[in-house]
Each structure stands twice: as structure tokens, then as C-alpha cells.
Image: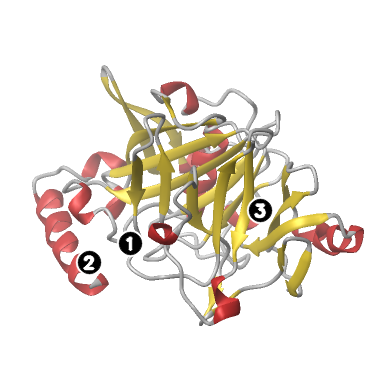
């Protein structure tokens, strides 16, 4: 299915390029990103002038028309224009308060099963795939309900998402994962890679080639970050050239561009999750209806949010 979707999207992309629709995503200084506003497209990031550190200005967050979800959750969308296959990209953004929403893992791999957001509990306020995957297993550290199911794997860019006993959510830097495990306070935890932001700073591996990240690779992306006030931000990109019918095509942003998106949403810490054909998200609206952005395959590990009672 993915190959068919890619073929159709590639034809669309080639046609658009031929009439110049994609050209505006590249400027003399290299690839750039623009956001659609009421007055047209506004360029907000350029690779040749990309910030090394993001402050709390959150220029993209202020452009979202936030919609209410269940208590403690809001969501919205952005339309971006970038270079090459990212010439039309939609970003679905969820912002949640962990003081009002409990996050927990769905460990489908322990039953040798796969999971999708359509399988989430009927009362779930949101759901998404968690971590990175190696065959039928999650990659790296997994803690569920206070019990360690898989031990950490240590790599320079592999951080972790930790939910502690109070429900607070932290994105833990790679060099702090071992200490976090030693503390033994994680109620839920999983690893992923690469880190996109650490204390607002973009890692060197995302700024200079040759440091373990393919900076030219484009794909559908999913990321999780935290704001300075403790709220959690989840962002999923979708190919947006031909509407939702081809949204699952794995075209999109580079890792560095996704770091910029998370920084411009106000995140201080951020971690890339498994995107591509695995990337999937659902959110419950205030009226109880559920919006889903499915992937094209099941995953061994999910993350689900439930409103605290």
C-alpha cells in the first residue's frame, strides 16, 4: 500500500514541480519553511539562518486556531510549505496538560500483537505510536506501570520520555537516561531518537552533517516535546498536496526541520518518534467525536491519554 501511495504522490509532486508549485520552498540560502496565514505564505525558518537555540517565543503556536478537546487537551493544524516533497505539509498539533491527563503505554508487544490508534480505549482522549521499533519490538527502554519490561539502550542521540508517579512528563536527554533509570521513579517510560531539542538547543548532529543523522532524508514525522510550564506537545506531519486521501504518504520534513517545528511551537525539550508509515495520532474533541490520522501499519507500543478523575 505504501508503494502505491508513494507512486501516486510522486506523480503529483512531479506535476507540481513542472508548473513551479514546489519551487518556492527553496531559496538561495537553501531550504526554507513557510506557514500559511490569512495574508498568504510567511517564511519563518531558513536552513542557512537556522537558530542554534529556540527561545519561548513560539511563533508557530501563535498561528494555530486551537480547538478544545477533552479537559486538559487542545489541538489544531498548520499548513507548511517547504522544499522538494515537503512542498505541502500539514502539521497536526496536540497540546495537553499532564495535571489533567494521565499518559500510559499500551504494551502490545508483550502479547505478540500489533496496535493502532483505532484500538485505543473508547474513553481515550488521545493516542499515538510511541518510540522507535526494531522488527516486532520497541527499541530501548520500556517501563509500564512501574515495571521495567525492556532495558535501556545507550546511544548519543537516544533520549527518553518519562512519566513519573505524579503524572508529570519529562523528555530526558541521552546522557541522563542511565541516571533516570537508577532513580527508579518512572511509572511509564520509553526511548526514542534522535533528540530534537535539549533545553531549547538544537543538537549538533542536526546542524552539521556527518554526526550520525541523515540531514537530507525526508519523511512523515511524529515528535513529542515539553513546554517550560510542563505541558506536552505532540506534532504529526501529513503530506498535504492532495487532501487527506494521501495524507499517509511518507513524504515530509527533515529531522532538522522537525526540530525547528518543535522549537517554534515553544518546546524546550523534544524527541522524534517513529514516523513514516508508522506515524499515527487520534484526539477526542470536546463533543466526544474522535479525529484520527492513521498510519499504514500496526506498532508494538502505543501511548494513550485518559482524563484524570
Q: Which residue is mark 1?
A: 250
- Which quarter of the image is occupied by the N terminus? bottom left
Q: Secondary structure at mark 3?
A: helix
C-beta proximity under 8 Å, tags 2 and 3: no
* Mark 2 → mark 3, Cα distance in angstroms: 31 Å
Residue for point 14% across, 44% down: 20
Q: Which residue is mark 2?
A: 6
Q: Is residue 251 left or right of residue 273?
A: left
Q: Give the number of callouts.
A: 3
Question: How far across and down, in percent of the image, does residue 58 sit?
Answer: 55, 26
Work out whether 179 lies above or below 269.
Answer: below
Question: How far across and down, in percent of the image, does residue 67 sit?
Answer: 40, 26
Crowd band around label 2 with a 10 angstrom C-alpha radius: few (<14), some (14–19), many (20+): some
* Mark 3 → mark 1, Cα distance in angstroms: 25 Å
Q: Which residue is mark 3?
A: 204
- Which quarter of the image is occupied by the C terminus? top right
Which of the 4 image quarters holds residue 229? top right
Residue for point 38% across, 48% down: 237
* First along the sequence among labels 3 and 1: 3
Residue mark closest to the camera, 3 vs 1: 1
Q: Is residue 78 left or right of residue 61?
A: left
Work out whether 259 lies above or below 150.
Answer: above
Crowd band around label 3 with a 10 angstrom C-alpha radius: few (<14), some (14–19), many (20+): some
C-beta proximity under 8 Å, tags 2 and 1: yes
Q: Secondary structure at mark 2?
A: helix
* First along the sequence among labels 2 and 1: 2
Query: 123 or 300: nearer the eye?
Result: 123
Residue for point 80% across, 56% down: 186
* Mark 2 → mark 1, Cα distance in angstroms: 7 Å
Amino acid at each position: 500500500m505504501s508503494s502505491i501511495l508513494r507512486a501516486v504522490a510522486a506523480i503529483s509532486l512531479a506535476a507540481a514541480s513542472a508548473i513551479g508549485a514546489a519551487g518556492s520552498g527553496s531559496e538561495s540560502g537553501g531550504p526554507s519553511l513557510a506557514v500559511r496565514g490569512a495574508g498568504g505564505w510567511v517564511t519563518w525558518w531558513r536552513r542557512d539562518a537556522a537558530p542554534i537555540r529556540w527561545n519561548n517565543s513560539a511563533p508557530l503556536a501563535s498561528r494555530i486556531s486551537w480547538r478544545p478537546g477533552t479537559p486538559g487537551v487542545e489541538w489544531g493544524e498548520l499548513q507548511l510549505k517547504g522544499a522538494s516533497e515537503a512542498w505541502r505539509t500539514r502539521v497536526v498539533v496536540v497540546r495537553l496538560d499532564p495535571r489533567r491527563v494521565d499518559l500510559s503505554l499500551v504494551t502490545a508487544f508483550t502479547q505478540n500483537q500489533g496496535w493502532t490508534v483505532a484500538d485505543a480505549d473508547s474513553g481515550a482522549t488521545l493516542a499515538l505510536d510511541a518510540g522507535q521499533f526494531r522488527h516486532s519490538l520497541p527499541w530501548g527502554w520500556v517501563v509500564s506501570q512501574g515495571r521495567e519490561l525492556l532495558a535501556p539502550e545507550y546511544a548519543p542521540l537516544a533520549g527518553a520520555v518519562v512519566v513519573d508517579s505524579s503524572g508529570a512528563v519529562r523528555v530526558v536527554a541521552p546522557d541522563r537516561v542511565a541516571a533516570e533509570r537508577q532513580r527508579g521513579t518512572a511509572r511509564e517510560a520509553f526511548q526514542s531518537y534522535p533528540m530534537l531539542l535539549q533545553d531549547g538547543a538544537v543538537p549538533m548532529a542536526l546542524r552539521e552533517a556527518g554526526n550520525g543523522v541523515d540531514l537530507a532524508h525526508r519523511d512523515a514525522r511524529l515528535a513529542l516535546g515539553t513546554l517550560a510550564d510542563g505541558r506536552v506537545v505532540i506534532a504529526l506531519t501529513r503530506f498535504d498536496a492532495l487532501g487527506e486521501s494521501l495524507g499517509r504518504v511518507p513524504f515530509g520534513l527533515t529531522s532538522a526541520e522537525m526540530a525547528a517545528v518543535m522549537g517554534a511551537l515553544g518546546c524546550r525539550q523534544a524527541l522524534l518518534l517513529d514516523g513514516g508509515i508508522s506515524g499515527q495520532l487520534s484526539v477526542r474533541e470536546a463533543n466526544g467525536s474522535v479525529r484520527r490520522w492513521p498510519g499504514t501499519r500496526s506498532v508494538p507500543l502505543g501511548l494513550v491519554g485518559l482524563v484524570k478523575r
